[in-house]
Amino acid sequence: GTGKSMGELRNMIGNPVISPFETTQGVTAAQAAGRIQVYADHGNGFSEEDSCILSESKDAVIMQNPSGNGEVTFILPVAGSCRAVRIDPAMGRCMTEVKEVIWNGTELPLEGRDFGCNGVRICTADADEGQAFKSGGAGSGKTYGNGIRKKLKKMMGKGKSSVRQTKSLFAFDTEDPGMLFSLIGCESREENILKVTLSTVPLPASFAGKLS
């Protein structure tokens, strides 16, 4: 048809829609790391005492993507036997793209029984059809209308080909977002190495609620 979306109309009158991922341009690694908290479960569950905020950790190595788009890679030593780790990507509602989570050289899965989160997986492989699946699996999927689908594409800030190559985007409609990785069966060392690369942007509560 010849109809135009509100976003297209805004662009025509000189008030373009801004992608939240674009708004992270110029965000430093330290700023991004200041929003990330990592918990380790050594057998007694997760606690604030056994966690760290990356920017406050003396042991964490933090690297920034040269593009300065808010993507951050960090390497964090985790002592002793560890049953699970929890990564909180922000301290509020957000959308997070997880590039990699590596434990002692082995990449951890972003699906299945060894992974969990309190957000919604945006199944970008089906972004054109507007499919979004909760982290439990495709069986709990839901279909979004055209307006939500277009906004998701803008938020991802990616071309069609790259959109179809990732299933690692999560939206969190909570002030305490978190992703849990079970380490049962994984190699354990006296000092373990956790390496993570992710990119996070804040989400307005009004929009985050539409994704849950």
Image: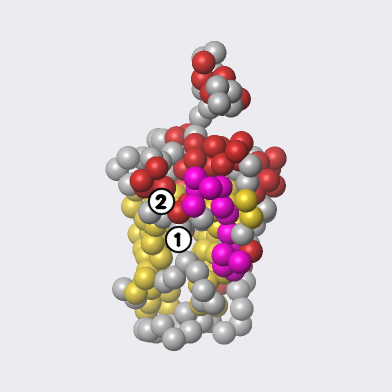
Helix, strand or loop at mark 2: loop
Q: Position of residue 196 (x, y in %)?
A: 40, 61
The residue most toward the top is 13
Is 106 or 87 nearer to us in this picture? 106
User: Residue at 49% of width from left, 40% of height from top?
Assistant: 153
Category of crowding for the residue at label 2, using alpha-carbon neighbours closer than 10 angstroms: few (below 14), some (14–19), many (at least 20) = some
Q: Name the residue under label 2.
A: 164
Could you tell whether 90 is left or right of 167 in the image? right
Label drawn at residue 209: none
In the rendered image, is residue 27 in sight? Answer: no
Residue stretch rendered in magenta on the structure: 126-139
| Magenta region includes residue 136 | yes
User: Residue at 56% of width from left, 52% of height from top?
Assistant: 131
Helix, strand or loop at mark 1: loop
| Screen quadrant of the N terminus | top right
Q: In which quarter of the image is residue 107?
A: bottom left
Q: How is the image coloured?
A: secondary structure
Say above or below: 171 vs 41: above
In the rendered image, is residue 166 in sight? Answer: yes
Q: CA separation, marks 2 and 1?
A: 36 Å
Q: Which amino acid does label 1 sit on?
A: Ser
| Magenta region includes residue 71 | no
Q: Disc 2 vs disc 1: which is toward the camera?
A: 2
Q: Position of residue 64 (x, y in %)?
A: 34, 48
Q: Position of residue 119 (x, y in %)?
A: 61, 58
Q: In which quarter of the image is residue 50?
A: bottom right
